[in-house]
Image (tube, rainbow, N blue to C red):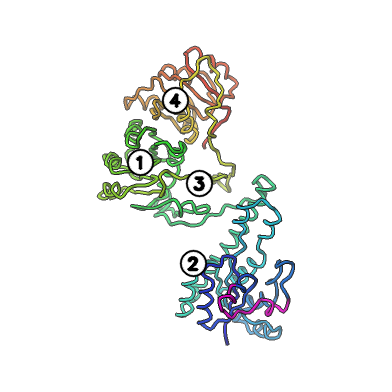
Amino acid sequence: MKKRALVSVSDKSGIVDFCKSLIELDFEIISTGGTYKLLKENGIDAIEIDEVTKFPECFEGRVKTLNPYVHGGILYRRDKDSHIKQAEELGVKAIDLVCVNLYPFKETIEKTDDFEEIIENIDIGGPAMVRSAAKNFASVLIVTDVNDYESIIEAVKNGSDDFDFRKNLMIKAYEHTASYDSMIANYMNQRFKNGFGEKQFIVGKKVFDTRYGENPHQNGALYEFENHFSKNFKILKGEASFNNLTDISGAVKIAAAFEDENAVCIVKHGNPCGFAIRENLKDAYTEALKCDPVSAFGGVVAVNGIVDKELAEKMNEIFLEVIIAGKITKEAQEVFANKKRIKLFEMGSDKLVLSNDKKDFKHIDGGFVFQDSDKVLDDEVKEAKLMSQKEATKDELKDLEIAYKIASLTKSNCVAYVKNSALVAIGMGMTSRVDAAQCALKKAKEVGLDVTGAALASEAFFPFRDSIDAAAAAGVSAVIEPGGSIRDDEVIQAANEHGMSLYFSGKRHFLH
């Protein structure tokens, strides 16, 4: 007796060849709508679904497979005599393979805001069939991924479609419907509840396992939203660890915050320890390294551009654990070939690529907190309000912008000092903003960097004038902060007393 396969797909790539192979394996094909039409046009002898359901497709295709002849054929247990007997009594014939992928909801919401069209692209019968087949996976092969067609044909042909094989298809099927339903729920909450409904679904697709998590006793893996890493992250040398990936994220966010400029950011343990913008990337790296060469040893370097042989030779002078860039040329890769511990990654573009996620979340004990993503807007510094008598020069405004973006992307409390488009001192993750400022200046003094004439940025307001006094003593010429303290008047007075320019952005950028 022939086996039967029910085939109903929105993504029709490869489906004709798949069905031809199934027929060669003595399957009978049942199909619906556009899939049925395509199969018939390609000479495949398929059975239309209403011959099975004994009921016509209706309500403009909203109902076609929601039928006991379909779900009974999928769900009845082949290992139970009572099920087999009842199937015979009801005239329900077994369906042994279900191949379904779902209505293109994601593609629809990306191309239109027409709610009626969006609603009509919510699949109902498809997820029901997938879930039914997955529930009865011991007897029914459930196929939801076009990339699995070849392996499924081979497994059926070779008789290797055993429990483990079917189990993996079952898991993939439930992941598929869960992801689909999550996408719809999140969309509806975004449309009608500003993205903050009673349930929040965070769905990622596995890219690869990391060797371990933050520590060797923890398991770890990288998951992606959409296809950001699959599309933009290429491993050239080495294995990306869990910690590498978090450091890379921090470094790339800072380096790429300056769009097309030749920016280089050096990160150690999630915190920036060097940054610079120059006319060429080699000079940018050289200047970035000066901020804290000790911490940079074994660090992560993000290059907003192409690493060529000359830059690679300069970077190869010290041990760096990770380099991530827009591209790394073949000649540059050869420079690092003999360094066993260095890891090289690129994004396949002339510049670094950001995903620009719209939402952000963080795990806390027992759950997670969820929020809109934070970002420094392009005009945030340009439109900052001058609070002092003295205005900043054009160069100082550029330094203020750089310092402000770095501070906003660094753990609070943070202050950043930038001079001539290079980070010269930074204090981060401190419990006191005064401590952060003092720590930054102490570090700068230790490495022999002069902060005279530097611009200072804080991601939150200065609660007292003491930070301004300390900055003035160090020679800082310009300051930017959000403002909003009850002692703002004292801070402004201090800036005027020291002849500094002071700007309030009006927006806080905590990063906890």
* Up-down relation of residue 304 to residue 217 (above or below): above
Q: Amino acid at mark 4?
A: Ala
Q: Which mark is residue 289?
A: none
- The Cα–Cα distance between marks 2 and 4, rounded to whole angstroms, is 55 Å
Q: Amino acid at mark 1?
A: Gly
Q: Quadrant of the N terminus?
A: bottom right
Q: Amino acid at mark 2?
A: Asn
Under tag 4, what secondary structure?
Answer: helix
Mark closer to the observer (3, 4) = 3
Residue 58 placed where, x, y %? Answer: 74, 70
Identify the magenta region.
38-55
Going from N to C along the chain, the mark reached first, 1 or 2, is 2
Q: Visible in this render: residue 302? A: no
Going from N to C along the chain, the mark reached first, 2 or 4, is 2
The residue pinned by badge 2 equals 147
Q: Which mark is residue 299?
A: 1
Quarter of image, res 285: top left
Going from N to C along the chain, the mark reached first, 3 or 1, is 1
- How many numbered circles are shown? 4
The residue pinned by badge 3 equals 355
- Whether the residues at callouts 3 and 4 have beta carbons within 8 Å, the answer is no
Q: Visible in this render: residue 314? A: yes
Under tag 1, what secondary structure?
Answer: loop
Q: Is residue 205 left or right of residue 324?
A: right
Q: Residue at x 40, y 47 (%)?
A: 244
Q: Residue at x 48, y 57 (%)?
A: 206
* Up-down relation of residue 126 to residue 468 (above or below): below
Q: Residue at x 60, y 81 (%)?
A: 78
Going from N to C along the chain, the mark reached first, 4 or 1, is 1
The residue pinned by badge 4 equals 437
